[in-house]
Amino acid sequence: MTHSDMAAVSATPASNINRPPAQLEEWLALRTEAPLEPAQPILDAHIHLWNGNRGRFIANEFRSGAQGHNVLAALFVQCYTHYRPCGPDLEQPLGETEFVLKLAEAENLVEEAPVMAPSIVGFANLAYGARIRPMLEQHIQLAKGRFRGVRHGLQYSASGVGRNGPWQPANGQMYTADFREGFAELEPLGLSFDAWLYHPQIPDLVDLAKAFPGTSIVLDHVGMPLGVGPYRGKREEVFAEWKVSMARLAELPNVVVKVGGLGMLYHGFDFELADVPPSSEMLARAWRPYIESVIETFGTERCMLESNFPVDAQTCSYGVLWNAFKRITSGCSLGEKHALYVGTTARTYRLPQFDASLPAFGKA
């Protein structure tokens, strides 16, 4: 943030601490914006759905937040929710796919609502090796044609940054024989892999992508350049390291990038400390170097925009987030915008019905 932006910062809540749902809703309501470029089609590449101790973010909440923006559909990515309460550990994540499918089928009966979860990326513990194959097949069967890939969390930091979830990845996991044996089961089933990791781990992903050139790999959240813990105050140093690693990853054609997730508190922008949520102009200033660097390095045909909601709601509302993206991409051509907002997501997750239906925003 600039010095003028920092003037609005208060002492609480502590950085990297999520606001409780009720407090968050009140805070977000302090900043509203009219949607920019409201006709621009959006295929949101990454949302979560849950209803429990983390709060409630299901169809109604998503639909309310998306109003005013032309959101065609929102793609679901695993978030350790609604697991089966009993049975083998290996099979409990199937409950998440069952929950999302039921929610999506009900929501898709609502007229003029965004299509909910036309693509599902679920969790499967690839460290089980080849034994994971039957579970992957069950995900595919349960999802009724919507299951597109797996996200197996890889995020590890020796400093303990981000260790606040049920899944605690081990260091060097991408190199283990069991993990790679499980990873090898994805390509024969036509499944992609979403990689959630921190920026120091990008070289590990380079090695994995080289070893499996036939598997489509999606790097989530621009590779998560960290800005908290031991990385606080080292933004320029982290940016330089991250940029070099991303350039090496871009050499591998089986890798695409989700552009977003910068509203997570791990990046250390500290917008969550302000008395009022940031405007889209403020977000665009902070995020532009990362987003423009990724687009320049990978090209728009290998980049897709994501909201990462409701996680990024700790920084801003859904509408303000898309306004920030639209400010950053305002200089792109129609074809480049089509790729970023719709095309790359539709191609990667095999959703041609959305890509083919938009000739007016086409590829000129």
Image (cartoon, helix red, strand yellow):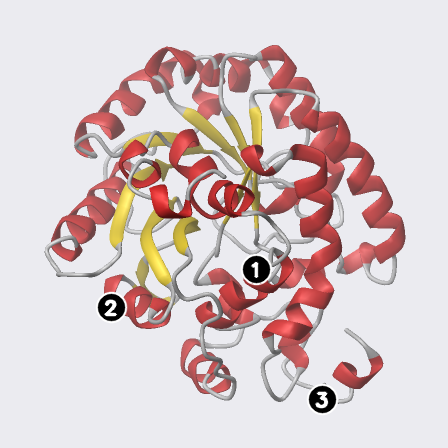
Q: Is residue 293 left or right of residue 217?
A: right
Q: Is residue 198 visible?
A: no
Q: Is residue 222 visible?
A: yes
User: In the displayed structure, does residue 236 sit left or right of residue 309?
Assistant: right
Q: Quick check: 1 left or right of 208?
A: right
Amino acid type for the residue under numbered disc 3:
Ala
Disc 1 marks which residue?
Answer: 325
**Number of other residues with Cα within 10 Å of mark 1, as a class: few under 14, some 14 to 19, many 20 or more:** many
Quadrant of residue 68 in the image? bottom left
Of marks 3 and 1, the one in the foreground? 1
Q: Residue at x 32, y 65 (%)?
A: 62
Which residue is identified by label 2? 60
Q: Which mark is residue 8?
A: 3
What residue is at 75 percent from the left and 43 percent from the top?
Answer: 158
Q: Is residue 140 shown above or below 292?
A: above
Q: CA distance from mark 2 to mark 3?
A: 32 Å
| The label number, if any, that marks residue 274 in the structure image | none
CA–CA distance in space, label 3 to label 1: 23 Å
First-in-chain label (3 vs 1): 3
- Type of the residue with mark 2: Asn
Q: Secondary structure at mark 1?
A: helix
